[in-house]
Image (cartoon, rainbow, N blue to C red):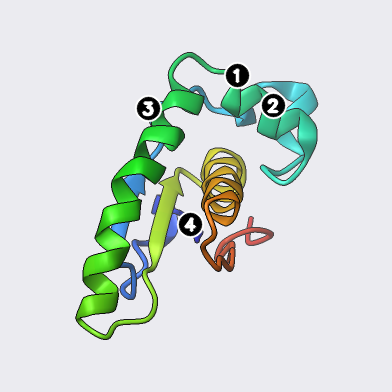
């Protein structure tokens, strides 16, 4: 899931990931009105230094954790990516993590809690 910190952390999240360390597309005039689902924003975010490597490594971290959740008979894991407003960075990173995990055989559902809230 993605969310905006300014609206509060999702209480049902098992893991919260803060991606506010990445440059904010909100400050790029051409990207401000778009979301992390748009290719221009997604490319902007994932092309930032360290962004693609971060999400790949996070996927590597999540893989063995899922085995533990399944062993505890918890069939799902909620990972919440947060940025300031929940429109750009968190959406792009959440979508990318979902793509990576799907490629690795996981069933993934993306939810963007605060998208469209502004």
Q: Is residue 10 above or below residue 63?
A: below
How far apart in space, not on screen, are marks 1 and 2 (Cα)?
6 Å
Name the residue rendered at 36%, 69% in the picture: 77
Looking at the image, the residue that sits furthest to the top is: 49
Camera-near label (2 vs 3) is 2
Camera-near label (2 vs 4) is 2
Residue at which label 1 appears: 47
Sequence-earlier tag: 2 or 4: 4
Query: Which quarter of the rendering shows the C terminus?
Result: bottom right
Image coordinates of residue 26 in percent, x first then y, are: 62, 31
How far apart in space, not on screen, are marks 4 and 1 (Cα)?
21 Å
Q: Which mark is residue 3?
A: 4
Looking at the image, the residue that sits furthest to the bottom is: 73
10 Å neighbourhood of mark 2: few (<14), some, or many (≥20)?
few
Image coordinates of residue 65 in percent, x first then y, are: 25, 59
- Whether tag 2 and tag 4 are in contact, CB under 8 A, the answer is no
Name the residue rendered at 33%, 52% in the picture: 62
Sequence-earlier tag: 1 or 3: 3
Image coordinates of residue 22 in percent, x first then y, are: 45, 25
């Amino acid at each position: 899931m993605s969310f905006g910190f300014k609206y509060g952390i999702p209480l049902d999240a098992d893991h919260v990931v803060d991606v506010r360390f990445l440059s904010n597309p909100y400050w790029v005039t051409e990207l401000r009105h778009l979301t992390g689902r748009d290719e221009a924003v997604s490319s902007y975010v994932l092309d930032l230094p360290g962004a693609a490597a971060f999400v790949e490594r996070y996927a590597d971290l999540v893989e063995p954790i899922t085995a533990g959740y399944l062993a505890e008979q918890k069939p799902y894991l909620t990972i919440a990516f947060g940025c300031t407003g929940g429109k750009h960075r968190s959406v792009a990173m959440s979508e990318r993590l979902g793509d990576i995990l799907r490629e690795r055989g996981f069933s993934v559902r993306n939810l963007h809690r605060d998208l469209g809230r502004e």
